[in-house]
Amino acid sequence: MRKQLCYINYKVALIVLLSLLPRMVSAQAKLDSLIRRIDSLEAKMNQVQGRIIRQMPASRTETRSALEAGKLGGFVVADFRNTKLTIGGFIQADFIYDFKEPGNIHAFVPSSIPINNSPKGVLNFSPRQTRLGIGSESDTKLGKLKTILEFDLFNPDGTSVPRLRHAWGQVGRWGAGQYWSTFMDIDAFPNILDYQGPNAMAISRQIQVRYTQPLTWKSSLAFSFENPGSDVKYPADSGLSVRTIFPDFVAQYRYNFTDITHFQLAGLLHPISYDDVLKRDHSSIGWGFNLSGSVEVNERIKDNFDYQVAYGQGIARYFNDLAGSGHDAVAKSKASIEVLPLFAAMLFYEHWWSDELSSELGYSYLKLEQQRFLPTTDFSSSQYGVLNLLYYPSAFVKFGLEFLYGKHTTIDKQHSDNSRLQVSMMYKF
């Protein structure tokens, strides 16, 4: 009897096992499939982690010329077709105190200092230099393809609404979009905290098409057609009005002795078109030359001079202190205008006390040479001086203290000045 019961139990167990076997096989298959999917996801995550890289910034890429040239660094994403996408930028907070009424409270603009300005000081806190940039590089049959899309918070209306700085594409030797004018030398931008920069510096972002021809591995020649238009204030009773017909034309020669030391000479033709009271169109030609560069004094400690000397007629819109002021030309009758000659010069010295500490000392001068058709209370000249101490505790952080002095002089010899202290903190991402 006992043997018979054991036999029955064995048969029942066997039947149950056989009935569960398909489910066990199915469950094992599902488990194997799940393991394969997990392995696949881990492999893909490893690939993504290998393609998203936070590169350590190169030494001294927190200097102003490096930042303005787009060397922000950032997170790099590269695909399998040798394309690289870089997302980077920085957060910057500025704490500014003006000892007198400044005119412009956000940037140091000597031409904006009011004559007989109030001696009362002004305090201003601002995050407007904060910047975000997206860049890409790809290999194509036409050569290296590069794009730049960059924004900051320095909106001209005084708000912190994001503003487009650069929208630029370049493939091989051809480039187009909005970028630094070919007339200027962004690598000569001194290492300062003030957003505006030297009053006499040629600096302008222009919509343009550019062609760059390498001459040797150290030199190049570039040509560009840039945004048409002029910066002229026509009196309401003059009958003159702005016309936009011809683009600006710029030619630039550059020679690089080292990574820092370079020489650049640029020439500009700037057509100024307008209609007279009878709606007849006219054009006057503005022109100018800009000699600029940097000289590395000591290769070991990287001290260097930045310089620029420029002269021309009808080119005020290209210069920091006069852009937007209407000083390209002045109306001398109801049928004609006179382009205004301009002289600009600057010299700055950058000294590195150590790899973590640097200073900048410099002076800049800007003058309108011909003033006979301007009101006697109009701009004649401005001066700009700066001294700072900058600290770099890491490759991602910069702190600084800066003293600025500016002077504004009118045609009738009246003048006003202002001094500013600026403390800035910058954090790269």
Image (spheres, grey):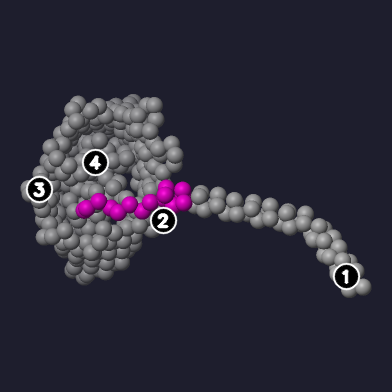
Mark 3 or 4: in front is 3
Q: Residue at x 28, y 41 (%)?
A: 180
Secondary structure at numbered mark 1: helix
* Sequence-earlier tag: 3 or 2: 2
* Sequence-earlier tag: 3 or 1: 1
Assign the C terminus to one quadrant of the image. Answer: bottom left
* Sequence-earlier tag: 3 or 4: 3
Residue 54 shown in magenta: yes
**Left or right relative to 74: residue 368:** left
Part of the protein shown in magenta: 46-60
The residue to which callout 4 is attached is 318
Q: Residue at x 82, y 61 (%)?
A: 14
Amino acid of disc 1:
Lys
Mark 4 or 1: in front is 1
Q: For mark 3, does the 10 Å Cα neighbourhood hold few (<14), some (14 to 19), or many (20 or more) residues?
A: few
Secondary structure at numbered mark 2: loop
Amino acid of disc 4:
Tyr
The residue to which callout 1 is attached is 3
Q: CA distance from mark 3 to mark 1?
A: 100 Å
* Sequence-earlier tag: 4 or 1: 1
Looking at the picture, tell me which residue is in the foreground, 50 or 348: 50
Residue 332 seen in the current view: no
Residue 173 picture quarter = top left
Amino acid of disc 3:
Glu
Q: For mark 2, does the 10 Å Cα neighbourhood hold few (<14), some (14 to 19), or many (20 or more) residues?
A: some
* Sequence-earlier tag: 2 or 1: 1
Q: Position of residue 57 (x, y in %)?
A: 28, 53
Mark 3 or 1: in front is 1
Amino acid of disc 2:
Val
